[in-house]
Image (tube, grey):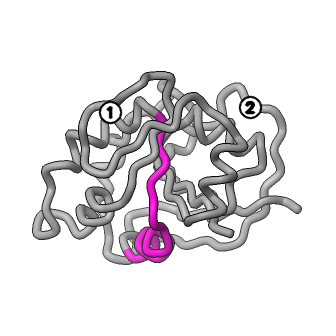
Amino acid sequence: MGKIHVHEFVSLDGVFEDPRFTMPYGFPEAQGAVLSSFMSECTGILLGRNTFEMFAPAWSTRTADEDPGAPFFNDSTKYVVTSASEVDSWQNSQVLGTYDADRIRELKSAENLYVSGSGTLVRAMLADGLVDELHLLVYPVVLGTGARLFEDMSKTGLRLVDHDVFDNGVLHLSYGPAD
C-alpha cells in the first residue's frame, strides 16, 4: 500500500495560493533535504488541474543542472484530477477525470504519490482520509488575502508527527491522520 504525501507552502494566515511570497526567505539546504526526504519515496505526482497548469511550463523545460528536483517532476507520472478530457502536454501526464476517492485509493494502492498546491484536491482528500502525510512549510508572514488551504473545510483531526525550524524562520510541520 502506498502513501499520499502532501506538501504545501503556507503563510501564517494559511494562504497558499501563490508561492512567490516564499522568495524573500530563500531555500536553505536543510529545507531542501526535508522535501527530498519524502519526495524520494514518491513514484508519481497527483495534481489538480490548476496546479498542473502552473507546474507544466515551470518544470517541463528545467534540467537537473538548473534544479535538482527537475528529474522528479519531469520523469514521474503526473496524474491530473480534472473534468477536462485532456491537459497541456508534459511528458508522462495522465488525466484521471473528476475527483473520485475510490480511484485515488486504487492509485495509492499501487504507488507513493506526491501532491503540491492543488487546494481543492487536498481538501477533498483530507475529508476522505486519503492523506498519509501533510507537510506544511509555514512562512513567517501574514498575507491577509489569497486562497487559504483550509478554506471551507469541516473539522479534520491531525496528529503532529515531526517538525523542523529552518534558519530562514520557516517551520516544517508534518502531520498524519489523528487516528
Please give the range of residues in magenta. Answer: 33-48
Residue 172 is situated, as x and y percent measured from the top left of the image, at 54, 64
The quadrant of the rendering that contains the C terminus is bottom right
Determine if the magenta segment contains residue 79.
no
Q: Residue at x 63, y 67 (%)?
A: 2
For residue 175, side relative to residue 6 (left or right): right
| Quarter of the image where one finds residue 101 | top right
Residue, x 78% and y 59% (percent of image)?
177
- Spot occupied by residue 86 in the image (x, y as percentages of width and height): 36, 28
Side (left or right) of 78 relative to 130? left
Three-letter amino acid code at the position of disc 1: Glu
For image coordinates 11% across by 69% down, the residue present is 65
Instruction: Please provide percent x and percent y for residue 41.
Output: 50, 74
Residue furthest out toward the right: 179
State which tag comes first along the sequence, 2 or 1.
1
Q: Would residue 40 be counted in the magenta stretch?
A: yes
Residue 140 visible at all: no
Q: Quadrant of the N terminus?
A: bottom right
Residue that appears at 78% across and 56% down: 158
Give the residue number, with chain letter if any, for mark 1.
Answer: 53
Amino acid marked by disc 2: Met
Question: In x, y percent, where is residue 11?
Answer: 50, 43
Nearer the camera: disc 2 or disc 1 = 1
Number of callouts: 2
What residue does disc 2 label? 153
Question: Residue 40 appears in which quarter of the rendering?
Answer: bottom left
Task: Give 104 or 72, whichever is nearer the viewer.
Answer: 104
